[in-house]
Amino acid sequence: MKLVASFAAALLTFSIVGPASASSSCDARAVVVVELDVYDGHEVMRINEVEPKSGAAFDDFFKNCARKTVVLASPSSTISQLLNIRFFIGKIGLKASKENFFVFAARPGGRTMTYLETFATIKYTRNKDELLKITEDPPQESNYL
């Protein structure tokens, strides 16, 4: 019986403290960049330019979570991949919003990327500092020339 009570207490503690500690650890980092693509029929995800091992996508996302999430989704990526990222954000106790979740249609190595909130097309970048600057004032109009 004590084991059940201990387990229940631990579960209750994690359900209250877990999301709070997750969001505070995410606040320690400014931006996480998630790249989504499909190669040879297989969904591919990179988190800060590193591809997670099979079955470890959420764990790697959690370890790298940040105040802002930038998704670079290739034209061949799937909607389920994008929904997975929103699910990951919710699972760690955060709510995706236009202040912390930014999705760009971007072909890896391409010259441009399109911010899907406004459909503004800008110069392509994977650089975290440049992406952080872009998210501070998201593009409202195309300016890639």
Image (spheres, helix red, strand yellow):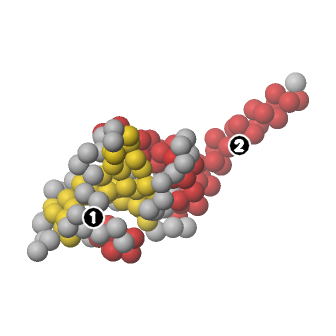
The vertical placement of 94 against 83, above or below, is below
Q: Is residue 5 left or right of residue 40?
A: right
Q: Is residue 67 left or right of residue 135?
A: right
Residue at image position (14%, 71%) is 144
Q: Badge 1: few (under 14), some or many (20 or more) residues near its Cα, within 10 Å?
A: few
Q: Badge 2: few (under 14), some or many (20 or more) residues near its Cα, within 10 Å?
A: few
Select label 2 or label 1 by which is in front.
1
In the rendered image, the residue lying farthest to the top is 1
Residue 13: mark: 2
Cα–Cα gap, marks 2 and 1: 45 Å
Residue flagged by tag 1: what amino acid is it? Gly
Residue at image position (58%, 54%) is 22
Q: Does residue 79 appear in the picture of this structure?
A: yes
Whether tag 2 and tag 1 are in contact, CB under 8 A, the answer is no
Q: Is residue 32 left or right of residue 118?
A: right
Question: Which element type, helix, strand or loop, lies under badge 1?
Answer: loop
Query: What is the tally of numbered marks visible in this picture?
Result: 2
Question: Which element type, helix, strand or loop, lies under badge 2?
Answer: helix
Q: Does residue 138 appear in the picture of this structure?
A: no
121 or 111, which is in the foreground?
111
Earlier sequence position, callout 2 versus callout 1: 2
71 or 124, which is in the foreground?
124
